[in-house]
Amino acid sequence: MTTRRAFLASLLASGAAPRLGWAAAGNPAYLAAARTADGSFALHGLDKDGQSLFHIPLPARGHAGAGHPTRAEAVGFARRPGTFALVIDCATGALRHRLTPAEGRHFNGHGCYAMNGAWLLTAEQYSDTSAGAIGVWDVEAGYRRIGEYASGGTGPHDLRLMPDGQTLAVANGGIATDPSDRRKLNIATMRPNLSYLNLAGEVVDQIELAPDLHHNSIRHLALRSDGLLAFAMQWEGEEGAAPPLLGLHRRGAAPILASAPLADEIAMRGYAGSVAFSGDGTEVAITSPRGGRLHRFSAEGVFAGPVSRADVCGLAPRATGFFLSDGLGGLLALQGGHTRALSQGALAWDNHIVWL
């Protein structure tokens, strides 16, 4: 009997159909990488209730993914310092392209589409200096690399295309690393920043934190539809400190640093692994797998309370709340501070969930 996936693959191979949209892959709501019980890795497409609609093998540990805005195509990025990014047809399971960084560069775990899906932009850094770069890939030309430009800082990690479709927000973590062992080389002098670039690579806006917070590495980003950007930070300074780990920024204004009460901030252990706005945009949250907890805030930065969950990290919008994953196989819904289990399995979910 011919399966749906085999039938779709034969259509594409024969040229009888154009590239298929996300409906052909079951209309997944999320992409997430995971490690299976046998130690192998895969990229999963999940529905809104956490059921896996498809899974496609990865050659090594994944970090994050990017979904094409119209067709059932996704890029799975390796954990930094990454040597691969796989372009996957999510309707057929076919590997379309394997991207490798330019000589002397490596991928840093994140990317996004731009120009209505015509370009893929990838966060990269020079292996010898950790200077940041944004790789530019022509999607319609088979993901051919057509250029790059500076990221505006050192060690870029996450990036987001702003709602105007013309501006790229980049989290430059500020940390120089040894690509052979991920050792951090410049903690004493690190300078993270949040940079906004136009698609020609010009810096149009940039913010840095106060000098006493220069050890707070800006790592991950979440974007609300009106342009409000949230950034999650990871503290590289004195152990036991309790700096704010969430920032909010709107272009043209000063950043807002959102703090929890001291005991709660200490419990995060200086580490925010992921950030997301709620589905209705009224809240924003960060997770700490090191602290085994999640912190909720209003969209204005007022602390709304903690949620305890061992090894929680993955975070994305869901309905009017959040969708969570942990490294112990759990997928959960969070609404108003209350969690509800969606599924529990043998998969160890990686750090990030991509909302399609």
Image (cartoon, rainbow, N blue to C red):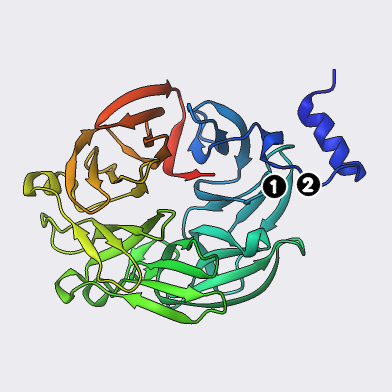
Count of picture labels = 2
Q: In this picture, is 222 found above or below 11?
A: below
Mark 2 surroundings within 10 Å by alpha-carbon count, few (fewer than 14), some (14 through 19), many (20 or more):
some
* Lower sequence index among marks 2 and 1: 2
Q: Give me the residue at 60% from left, 29% from top.
A: 53
Q: Give me the residue at 90% from left, 46% from top.
A: 15
Q: Is residue 178 visible?
A: no
Which residue is identified by label 1? 71
Mark 1: amino acid:
Arg
In the rendered image, the quadrant that contains the C terminus is top right
Q: Describe the element under mark 2 as helix, strand or loop.
A: loop
Q: In this picture, is 106 found above or below 211?
A: above
In the rendered image, the quadrant that contains the N terminus is top right
Return the x and y of residue 129 as percentages of the image width and height.
Answer: 43, 78
Which residue is identified by label 2? 19
**Which sits in the foreground, 35 or 140?**
140
Return the x and y of residue 285 as percentages of the image width and height.
Answer: 29, 45
Q: In this picture, is 309 found above or below 356?
A: above
CA–CA distance between discs 2 and 1?
6 Å
* Residues at circles 2 and 1 in contact by the CB criterion of under 8 Å: yes
Mark 2: amino acid:
Arg
Q: Give me the residue at 37% from left, 22% from top.
A: 341
